[in-house]
Image (cartoon, rainbow, N blue to C red):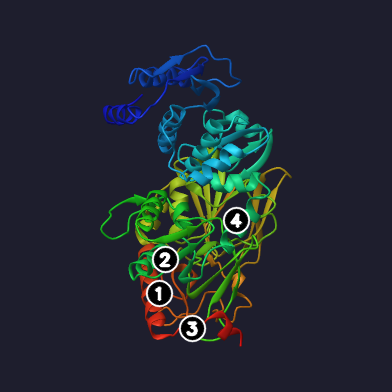
């Protein structure tokens, strides 16, 4: 199962074990069970603190427990093989079960251990999903460190009938107590916040204790990360407040145009950004959803950012880098069948539609790339484009038109996504020139029609927005409010690219530096006068 390189890497990692663990497998007939036996046997042979048994009685086969010998409650179960993107999750589960400390803060670990109640999680992942590992690892951490939490992590491709029966059409999908509980990428802090009703109030109180920043960045994507590094290196008190660190990069798979790096993946780049920020004196505050900007009353005064949890932060200057999100179609059926056939991540959810019929909405690079990827997995792809021609690069168009299981519809307006009440069963489109309506029977719809800036929360701030909702900035990244700057996909800067966002974030921080050294600070009493 493991090649020589992976075997050597795993052997090196297992040297960090502090106490014995056992692997308890439940096997059946067939190749998957044979591969599970082979994998566990190979792992057990790499360290004398690891043993493997094949007498398990779990409900699913093949599956296996990773259990701490000294504490049978410290266990996590994998159903199917956690390879591909999940191999790292397997390695971490082995290490954490064996007493190697996870790289999370003492505060988070204390919250994990203090969580009260009984929680039985089941989570479905696919081996091609780049959003799934964080959820797998978060649930593993909970299960191994809190006796009230159990986690069964299920590879959907191995248990297709179960996936169909439970209506799982998007991963990661988390069930709690047998009921659908959450979907999409979530870290351990987000899961804890959802489980712990007092988490928001504690987070707000913690924000209230912080002194005003010189530079506060709102948003944790490439633009925000770059801004924080540049601001911190100038010696300013710098903070980042973001819903999640990494932003939309976390939802990006292959990145091939990041200069000097021929190929990387979104989650890997996000982790590298986070590490670089951590090497500077930056206060990173995640799970913070900005709700309102209250501008300073006079130049040099303090701007205030209020958050959805009731907390707030103040700063002499602010860099807005809240990025953008996937644009929705806005047609009947889209929201009703979201995660029930309507999806936005072909890499994550494509394997769940193996052999089925799907549509991709959008003829730009992202839409055509999605159609090409899906054509290797699904039975048939219908690409629907509103314009009279595709907008993707010619090399992508040539590849698309060479595929035999792809149909391209041009000048086609999607008017409705239909379903049977439980899942998608079709799509209705209208010819823009003929006015005639048509229906395509299918099981999935992947929406790839661009981005929407995250600026709704700025509606009453006084900041000038474009007709598309983007923050209007000048050549120095300054907004219409003195001391407030903006960078990245949320702004009017053309070409929404990672490398451009980083440059814009750096520019915004340098502009904030110039503003701060030229503007005398005003204390709260003077500002209120």
Whole-angstrom CA distance, mark 4 to mark 2, is: 24 Å
The image shows residue 369 at horizontal and vertical percentages of 43, 53
Label 2 SS:
helix
* Viewer-nearest residue: 85 or 524: 524
Whole-angstrom CA distance, mark 3 to mark 4, is: 28 Å
Label 4 SS:
helix
In the rendered image, which residue does mark 1 sit on?
508
Asked if labels 1 and 2 touch by Cβ distance under 8 angstroms, the answer is: yes
Whole-angstrom CA distance, mark 3 to mark 2, is: 24 Å
Tell me, for residue 203, which label it has, or none.
4
Mark toward the start of the polypeptide (3 vs 1) = 3
Which-is-in-front pick, marks 1 and 4?
4
Asked if labels 2 and 4 touch by Cβ distance under 8 angstroms, the answer is: no
Mark toward the start of the polypeptide (2 vs 1) = 2
Asked if labels 4 and 3 touch by Cβ distance under 8 angstroms, the answer is: no
Q: Quadrant of residue 147?
A: top right
> Is 197 drawn above or below residue 260 in the view shown?
above
Asked if labels 4 and 1 touch by Cβ distance under 8 angstroms, the answer is: no
Which quadrant would the N terminus be assigned to in this image? top left
> Is 250 drawn above or below residue 470 in the view shown?
above
In the rendered image, which residue does mark 2 sit on?
223
Mark toward the start of the polypeptide (1 vs 4) = 4
Mark toward the start of the polypeptide (3 vs 2) = 2
The image shows residue 424 at horizontal and vertical percentages of 66, 46
In the rendered image, which residue does mark 3 sit on?
300
* Viewer-nearest residue: 258 or 200: 200
> Is 284 drawn above or below residue 357 in the view shown?
below
* Viewer-nearest residue: 422 or 263: 263
Residue ID at (42%, 49%): 267
The image shows residue 140 at horizontal and vertical percentages of 52, 34
């Amino acid at each position: 199962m493991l090649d020589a390189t992976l075997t050597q890497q795993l052997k090196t990692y297992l040297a960090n074990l502090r106490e014995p663990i056992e692997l308890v497998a439940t096997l059946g007939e067939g190749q998957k069970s044979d591969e599970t036996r082979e994998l566990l046997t190979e792992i057990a042979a790499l360290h004398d603190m690891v043993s493997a048994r094949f007498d398990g009685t779990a409900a699913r086969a093949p599956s296996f427990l990773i259990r701490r010998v000294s504490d049978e409650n410290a266990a996590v179960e994998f159903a199917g093989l956690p390879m591909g993107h999940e191999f790292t999750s397997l390695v971490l589960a082995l290490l954490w079960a064996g007493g190697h400390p996870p790289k999370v803060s003492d505060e988070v670990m204390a919250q994990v251990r203090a969580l009260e109640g009984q929680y039985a999680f089941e989570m479905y992942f696919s081996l091609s999903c780049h959003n799934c590992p964080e959820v797998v690892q978060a649930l593993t951490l909970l299960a191994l460190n809190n006796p009230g939490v159990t986690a069964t992590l299920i590879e959907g491709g191995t248990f297709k009938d179960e996936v169909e029966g439970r209506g799982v059409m998007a991963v990661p999908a988390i069930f709690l107590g047998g009921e659908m509980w959450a979907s999409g990428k979530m870290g351990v802090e987000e899961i804890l916040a959802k489980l712990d009703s007092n988490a928001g109030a504690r987070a707000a109180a913690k924000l209230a204790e912080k002194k005003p920043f010189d530079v506060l960045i709102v948003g944790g994507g490439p633009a925000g990360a770059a801004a924080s590094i540049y601001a911190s290196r100038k010696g300013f008190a710098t903070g980042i407040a973001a819903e999640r660190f990494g932003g939309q990069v976390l939802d990006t798979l292959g990145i091939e145009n990041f200069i000097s790096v021929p190929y990387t993946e979104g989650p890997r780049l996000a982790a590298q950004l986070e590490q670089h920020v951590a090497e500077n004196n930056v206060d990173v505050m995640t799970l913070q959803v900005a709700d309102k900007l209250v501008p300073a009353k006079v130049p040099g005064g303090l701007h205030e950012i209020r958050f959805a949890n009731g907390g707030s932060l103040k700063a002499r200057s602010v860099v807005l880098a809240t990025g953008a999100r996937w644009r929705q179609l806005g047609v009947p059926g889209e929201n009703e069948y979201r995660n029930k056939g309507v999806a936005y991540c072909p890499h994550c959810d494509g394997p769940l539609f193996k052999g089925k019929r799907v549509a991709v909405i959008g003829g730009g690079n992202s839409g055509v790339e999605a159609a090409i990827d899906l054509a290797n997995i699904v039975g048939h792809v219908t690409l629907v484009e509103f314009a009279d021609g595709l907008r993707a690069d010619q090399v992508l168009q040539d590849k698309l038109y060479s595929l035999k299981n792809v149909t391209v519809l041009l000048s086609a307006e999607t008017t409705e996504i239909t379903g049977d009440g439980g899942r998608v069963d079709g799509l209705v489109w209208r010819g823009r020139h003929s006015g005639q309506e048509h229906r395509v029977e299918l099981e999935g719809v992947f929406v790839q029609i661009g981005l929407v800036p995250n600026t709704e929360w700025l509606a009453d701030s006084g900041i000038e927005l474009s007709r598309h909702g983007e923050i209007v900035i000048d050549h120095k990244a300054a907004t219409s409010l003195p001391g407030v700057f903006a960078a990245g996909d949320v702004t009017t800067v053309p070409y929404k690219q990672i490398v451009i966002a980083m440059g814009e974030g750096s520019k915004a921080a340098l502009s904030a530096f110039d503003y701060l050294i030229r503007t005398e600070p005003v204390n709260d009493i003077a500002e209120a006068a």
